[in-house]
Amino acid sequence: MASPRFTNLVRRWVPLCIITLPLLCGFAMSDFNDHIAAKRKYLSQEARKMFYHAYDNYLTYAFPHDELKPLSKSFTDSLSELGNLKLEHLPQSYNGSALTLIESLSSLVVMGNNTEFERAVLWLSENLTFDVDARISLFECNIRVLGGLVSAHLLATDSSKRLSQGKYNNELLDLANDLGRRFLWAFNTSTGLPYAWINLKHGVMEDETTETSTSGCGSLILEMGALSRLTGNPIYDAAALRALRKLWSMRSSLNLLGTTLDVETGEWLEYSSGIGAGIDSFYEYLLKAYILFGRDEFWHMFHSSYLAVQKHFRHGPWYHEADMRTGKATYWQLTSLQAFWPGLQVLVGDIPAANLTHREFFYVWKRFGVLPERYLLDRAMLHPTEKYYPLRPELAESTLYLYQATKDPWYIDVGESIMKSLNMYTKVDGGFASIRDVSTMQLEDHQHSFFLAETCKYLYLLFDSSFLASENYVFTTEGHPLPVRSSWHDWLPDVSMPTDVTSVKINNLSTKSSALSSQICPALLATLKEDQPVESACHIHDGRASHRCESHEECGIDSTTCRQRSCSLAGYCGLWLLI
Ligand SMILES: *[C@@H]1O[C@H](CO)[C@@H](O)[C@H](O)[C@H]1NC(C)=O
Ligand SMILES: *[C@@H]1O[C@H](CO)[C@@H](O)[C@H](O)[C@H]1NC(C)=O
Ligand SMILES: *[C@@H]1O[C@H](CO)[C@@H](O)[C@H](O)[C@H]1NC(C)=O
Ligand SMILES: *[C@@H]1O[C@H](CO)[C@@H](O)[C@H](O)[C@H]1NC(C)=O
Ligand SMILES: *[C@@H]1O[C@H](CO)[C@@H](O)[C@H](O)[C@H]1NC(C)=O
Ligand SMILES: *[C@@H]1O[C@H](CO)[C@@H](O)[C@H](O)[C@H]1NC(C)=O
């Protein structure tokens, strides 16, 4: 670990090295890099320990049930409780689907444990069934179960030969296909928007609620699109795309969407909107679907949404909520889920904005020890009933993206600090427990499966990115990697809406080391110096912040048009064309 003095020395010397004395400083820099490498190595082992503490305890006390209760060292069959706040219509007899095992599959691969991956794949191949009388959330089951299976199938069948030859015969894909078919019941609505809940055995229940969330309809395309491409059956992709298009058609004139809606009437129920709960993964899936499937339509929707978000929700580094119709602020609240946003901004190439927001979230993390679920910005206090921290991954996730994009060792320190807090406050003998109240650090008897699928994985990847070097991956909102393959880009006949001809493609993703580092203008990025900040057109400047300039060069590249941004006569950087 770095002593403060060493760190200060480095902070002072490194910029100087870069600017003035590359030769003389060569030795100091290589020492510094060795130091970072050693530190990352040590921390990756700590992250690995964390994962196995969670995983082994799950196997011992909970498997094949869904999730571990780490305090009582028992289990919970929680699949039908996910997203089910009022715990309605719980199954009479349901003994779990090994949810945490499914969620751990890709993490085992990321950590290089092929033996255990094989054991888990074979167990699931023989024992998992979806013919169970359980009502589940389409959204949760899609991102956790379908995503876990599809990703594991891809990892089991890529060129790495992780499994013993002949042992695996696409059983996970068959299971995913079976689950996908059950999902289709939810889409049988007049609007094409899917019901939020289905019974895996019987389909949509009588008198089922027609209320769902924007995320519930808008974050299915990665998993269902991948399933279509793997099975050759376009129906899953078509169902998810139809829902997404319908959702997009419901946007306001400000290009904003609400957070809850009715799937039969296609009307909004909640107009207040933001980047957190109920809508977060909608934005995420638009951009990631564009990277994975390459349709301009996705980029077009993403770009319009992103600009609208930056314009209407952003307040300095924070994002508040606003009415989708008027853009008027509704709630001034920071929520733990919003911490994924900087990670998404890295994918767009909007590094300065990502850095700014990430720093604020980390500041809140340090203040409370973890991130509270909801914090009232206007009253500077915790939300009275949402004081919990259920081992969420979003801050670690954004830290990983920022580190990948900048290689700034500061983000390694952030990851170390996050891991330390998790070990200090949430580690118990029987696993990792959620925090019920961040003001008292009182624990709750629940280890969520996403702790293994995401939190541990993102921390590990921050410290050891060897997995990312093997292929380009897009991570689903549940942290399951899907490889970016050019054959997936032109798979379906293009039935997309007419798109804006000016929308820009991400060039040659396949030549980059990882989708994590993908930028809009890779060719231009290559010519920039490593420490030179890159801004994108998506970045909307604060009126207050001065972006004064004397020359066009100071204004950087507009990463949407890939053109040089210009310095106006009045001396401000802008998007206007060069005169
Ligand atoms: C669940 O387990 C209980 C106790 O072992 C058993 O009685 C019940 O039949 C099982 N239910 C199902 C659906 O397998
Ligand atoms: C793989 O996981 C199993 C189960 O946790 C563990 O016993 C084994 O040591 C792991 N192997 C490696 C190489 O980490
Ligand atoms: C399926 O489950 C049973 C009961 O847990 C177990 O004995 C069997 O080995 C499992 N199948 C595989 C391939 O692991
Ligand atoms: C779709 O819904 C309609 C009307 O509720 C129903 O009559 C029909 O059987 C459903 N189709 C399927 C395939 O479930
Ligand atoms: C992030 O922000 C900090 C504080 O403003 C700054 O020192 C650092 O250089 C920034 N890093 C990047 C990559 O923009
Ligand atoms: C894009 O990728 C293709 C195939 O990998 C390669 O042949 C081509 O040279 C790349 N183009 C650029 C501009 O990097």
Image (spheres, rainbow, N blue to C red):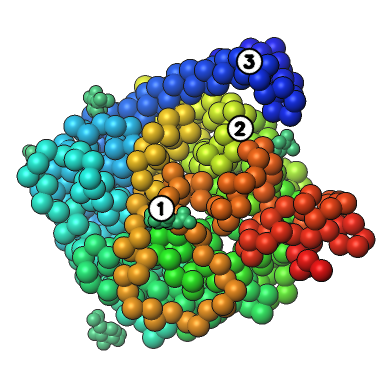
According to the image, label 2 marks what residue? 408
User: Which of disc 3 and disc 2 is earlier in sequence?
Assistant: 3
Q: Is residue 183 left or right of residue 477?
A: left
User: Which of disc 2 and disc 1 is earlier in sequence?
Assistant: 2
According to the image, label 3 marks what residue? 28
Residue 118 visible in the snapshot:
yes
Secondary structure under the numbered disc 3 in the rendered image:
helix
Q: Is residue 98 left or right of residue 323?
A: left
Q: Residues within 10 Å of mark 2 (few under 14, many from 20)?
A: few
Spot occupied by residue 120 in the image (x, y as percentages of width and height): 19, 39
Q: Quadrant of ligand 4?
A: bottom left
- Residue type at tag 2: Asp
Q: Residue at x 37, y 71 (%)?
A: 240
According to the image, label 1 marks what residue? 510
Q: CA distance from mark 3 to mark 1?
A: 34 Å
Q: Residue at x 44, y 21 (%)?
A: 41
Q: Residue at x 65, y 40 (%)?
A: 529
Residue 197 visible in the snapshot:
no
Quadrant housing residue 250: bottom right
Q: CA distance from mark 1 to mark 2?
A: 24 Å
Q: Is residue 402 left or right of residue 21?
A: left
Q: Residue at x 38, y 78 (%)?
A: 494
